[in-house]
Amino acid sequence: MSSVDTSKIPNSLQEHWMPFTSNKDFKENPRLITGAKGVYLTNHLGKTMIDASSGLFCNPFGHGRKEITEAVAKQLEQLDYCQPFQQGFGGSFELATKISRHTPGNLNRIFYTICGSTAVETAIKIAIAYHRAKGDGQRFRFIGRERGYHGMNIGAVSVGGMVNNIKTFASILMPGVAHMRHTHLPEHKFISGQPTTGIELADDLERIAANFGAENIAACIVEPIAGSTGTLVPPKGYLKRLREICDKHGILLIFDEVITGWGRTGSAFASQEFGVTPDIITMAKATTNGVVPMGVVACKEEIYDAVMDAAPKGAVELFHGYTYSGIPVAVAAALAVQDIIEKDDIFNRAKEMAPYFQKGLFTLKDIDVVENIRGYGMMGGIDMKTNIKPGKAGFECFKTCYEVGVNFKATGDCLIIAPQFICEKKHIDEIIDKLRTGILKYSKNIKN
Ligand SMILES: Cc1ncc(COP(=O)(O)O)c(C=O)c1O
């Protein structure tokens, strides 16, 4: 008789088609999470695991934050929903003011969306609307980057550079998109922080501009640090050069900070961390500590002004929005997060913990099956040697680590590590110790 307690498994796992999941594998061997508190998760077997990736980079302020729960409950009692078109409520304006205090430069105009993908899609539409408003309607091209991840709607997949997504949906992607090369070079081995080589990869933008006509390009979108493909840190000077090329040609620069926003690098945004101000920033995830879906687009004031000025008074200036754009419950969670950021001095906390985390992460470099490690701030990627089928090493290693009590996400053969900002040194130690145990156990299994 099996000793496994199946009482927390629902009667059937078949009906739910799970996202980005090996459904067949999962349903044979489910991993159900039943509780979360602070930096720990509990699964249906009653086992406690440390959360080494803040969910999907969403919960850096810790699971089960009472302040957020209470704010959401209170909001639901007072005003559960209010339509966001031609109507509003005070909270969304208050939140926009608070967000704009953290955004760099004059990115002070805030548009709410539902998630990261819709934030990216909105940024794309705002870029188009801006150029049209300025009489530059021919600017329809977008430039993304290989190994970029911007989400899963058509716009986001089009500008993204994840091979499997692009291959699968090639027939329905946006026209006019070109991709720069990614910034990961073979010599970038076991580097914590910014590589010193590779700045010239930014010149891909210049080259694409020359090939397609710079006057036809609406915007260039990049993640300042590519997160989902394993912390690809920009080479020194790279983002600044992108900024210069965009300025030269009137191309808008969009930073997708869905992962790097709200402290992951140790600054509010990677933009401030790297000293480069884009025209538009997208954010999501940590905006609400991941508990209620919400995306945000912050734009320079002149972008907003141009779109406003182009429309007659009384007309809808931007034909875009979502039923759930900045709904009260999401705003309540985000306002509670703003309080936590202030009260707990979150960005400084992340900045102070980052060197300790980075040091710990790179102690794993001696493990035979570890191919490479990259890191910046409170994020890191561990590439596993791909000695079987691509993607298999990452998935198998993830499952072994889950068994030993450390949870994270694997993308392909890269383990994505992004501890919560509330981690103390002992939690970082636990993450690193368990990663070592799990990776070694995995490596023993593949050798047998
Ligand atoms: C940089 C980046 N942009 C956009 C997205 C898409 O966000 P969502 O899954 O909330 O739509 C993600 C998700 O991981 C992301 O990492």
Image (cartoon, rainbow, N blue to C red):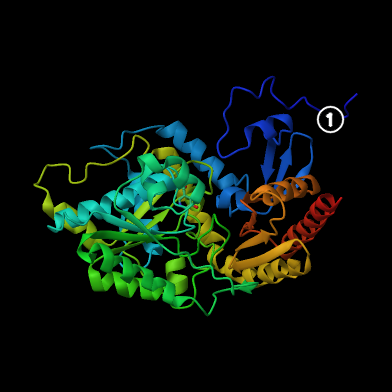
The extreme bottom residue here reads: 196
Tell me where residue 217 sits by quadrant.
Answer: bottom left
Image x and y of residue 194, in percent: 54, 74
- Choose between 78 and 341: the one closer to the eye: 341
Q: Compared to 348, does 197 lie above or below?
A: below
Q: Is mark 1 within 8 Å of ligand 1?
A: no
Image x and y of residue 5, in percent: 82, 28
Q: Compared to 210, does 440 lie above or below?
A: above
Position of residue 100 in the picture relative to residue 32 (left or right): left
Position of residue 238 in the picture relative to residue 32 (left or right): left
- Choose between 61 and 430: the one closer to the eye: 430
Residue at the spot 31% in from the left edge and 73% down from the top edge: 245
Image x and y of residue 407, in percent: 70, 49
Q: Is residue 38 visible?
A: no
Residue tagged by mark 1?
A: 4
Residue at the spot 38% in from the left edge and 49% down from the top edge: 158
Image x and y of residue 282, in percent: 39, 55
The extreme right residue here reads: 1
